[in-house]
């Protein structure tokens, strides 16, 4: 018996700002507007989907946007993929190196303070939008999935596992609480695309705990298992096998995975699927990141 695979197409949550980050921004931007802020500040890797979704959403809401983007080495990054879209929105982009990026929360707080001295009011969104308020987007998303399922699907809960790529933990945390609330799945398999299980488990647990405060009531969640076997050569880089898998999925389904997150997550499921009869894969988006990696496919296509 094979595994029945269902896909939640959160790569289609919007237009160019689509992906999982938009679910988080729905709540974070509402909070920023409620507080009367005029600027969004956030951070990420140079090809961050979160930074791009924030920049586009800020432009749409008439807010200014400040981005701190982590660059590799000393060369100026090419303006392509997510960075091209960031630039088109007119966001103020600050490139920072790895050691400086470790201090990102302080950098963003200082930028907010500087803006405030000039009469502005900035709202700081943490990396990946991964705090409890952002994760609330995925509590709601799991309720949405439950409502979309056919009533005769049987089994309670209908999915053995929800599989999702994990980069800052907020999506996995929201899914874990939402899956319990909606009675949707037994567990969440969070596929780490950087760092390892020891790094992510406490982070995800902390966001789940904070969700209780945001929701204002005792909150249960299904267990989250962080799997770090699918990371490949490192953050943002796929193995040749993972690239081949991405191309195969495109060819056989028309679904485009991205080389930073979703290709790794779905590839990681292949090894683990034998014990699972029905799985929900949350396609979290990332198309601009694929377009920024055309050269990785040189030998393949
Ligand atoms: C950010 C991102 C993820 C990871 O979500 P986290 O909540 O940061 O763990 C997965 N897929 C894509 C395409 C992303 O941009």
Image (tube, helix red, strand yellow):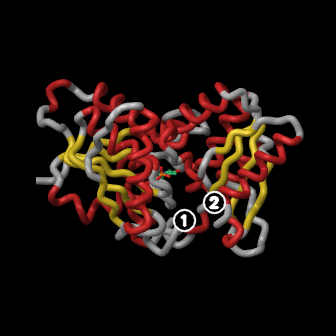
Asked if the residue at tag 1 contacts the one at tag 2, i.e. Cβ–Cβ closer than 8 Å, the answer is yes
Q: Is mark 2 within 8 Å of ligand 1?
A: no
Residue 121 sits above or below residue 259 on the image: above
The nearer-to-camera label among 2 and 1 is: 2
Q: Position of residue 43 (x, y in %)?
A: 66, 53
Q: Residue placed at 67% from the left, 44% from the top?
A: 124
Label annotation for residue 45: 2
Task: State which tag comes first along the sequence, 2 or 1.
Answer: 2
Neighbours of disc 2 within 10 Å: few (<14), some (14-19), many (20+) = many
Neighbours of disc 1 within 10 Å: few (<14), some (14-19), many (20+) = some
Q: Is residue 2 left or right of residue 252?
A: left
Question: Does residue 283 appear in this view?
Answer: no
The residue at which mark 1 appears reads as 236
Residue 130 sits above or below residue 272 on the image: above
Near-viewer residue (248 or 175): 175
Residue 29 sits above or below residue 251 on the image: above
How far, Cα to Cα, is label 2 from label 1?
9 Å
Q: Residue placed at 27% from the left, 61% from the top?
A: 270
Q: Picture quarter containing residue 68?
A: bottom right
């Amino acid at each position: 018996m094979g595994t029945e695979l269902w896909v939640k197409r959160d790569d289609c949550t919007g237009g160019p700002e689509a992906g999982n980050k938009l679910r988080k921004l729905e709540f974070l931007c509402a909070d920023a507007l409620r507080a009367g802020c005029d600027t969004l500040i956030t951070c990420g890797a140079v090809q961050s989907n979160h930074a791009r979704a924030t920049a586009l959403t800020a432009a749409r809401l008439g807010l200014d946007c400040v981005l701190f983007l982590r660059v590799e080495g000393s060369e100026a990054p090419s303006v392509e993929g997510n960075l091209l879209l960031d630039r088109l929105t007119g966001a103020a982009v600050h490139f920072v190196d790895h050691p400086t990026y470790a201090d990102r929360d302080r950098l963003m707080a200082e930028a907010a303070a500087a803006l405030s001295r000039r009469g502005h009011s900035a709202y700081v969104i943490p990396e990946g939008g991964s705090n409890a308020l952002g994760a609330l987007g995925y509590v709601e998303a799991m309720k949405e999935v439950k409502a979309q399922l056919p009533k005769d699907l049987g089994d309670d809960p209908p999915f053995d596992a929800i599989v999702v790529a994990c980069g800052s933990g907020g999506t996995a945390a929201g899914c874990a609480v939402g899956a319990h609330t909606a009675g949707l799945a037994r567990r969440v398999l969070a596929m780490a695309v950087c760092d390892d299980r020891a790094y992510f488990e406490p982070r995800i647990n902390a966001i789940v705990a904070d969700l209780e405060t945001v929701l204002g009531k005792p909150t249960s969640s299904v267990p989250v298992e962080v799997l770090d076997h699918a990371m490949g050569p490192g953050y943002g880089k796929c193995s040749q096998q993972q690239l081949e898998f991405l191309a195969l999925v495109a060819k056989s389904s028309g679904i485009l995975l991205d080389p930073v997150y979703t290709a790794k997550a779905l590839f990681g499921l292949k090894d683990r699927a034998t014990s699972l009869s029905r799985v929900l894969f949350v396609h979290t988006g990332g198309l601009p990141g694929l377009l920024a990696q055309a050269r990785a496919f040189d030998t393949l296509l």
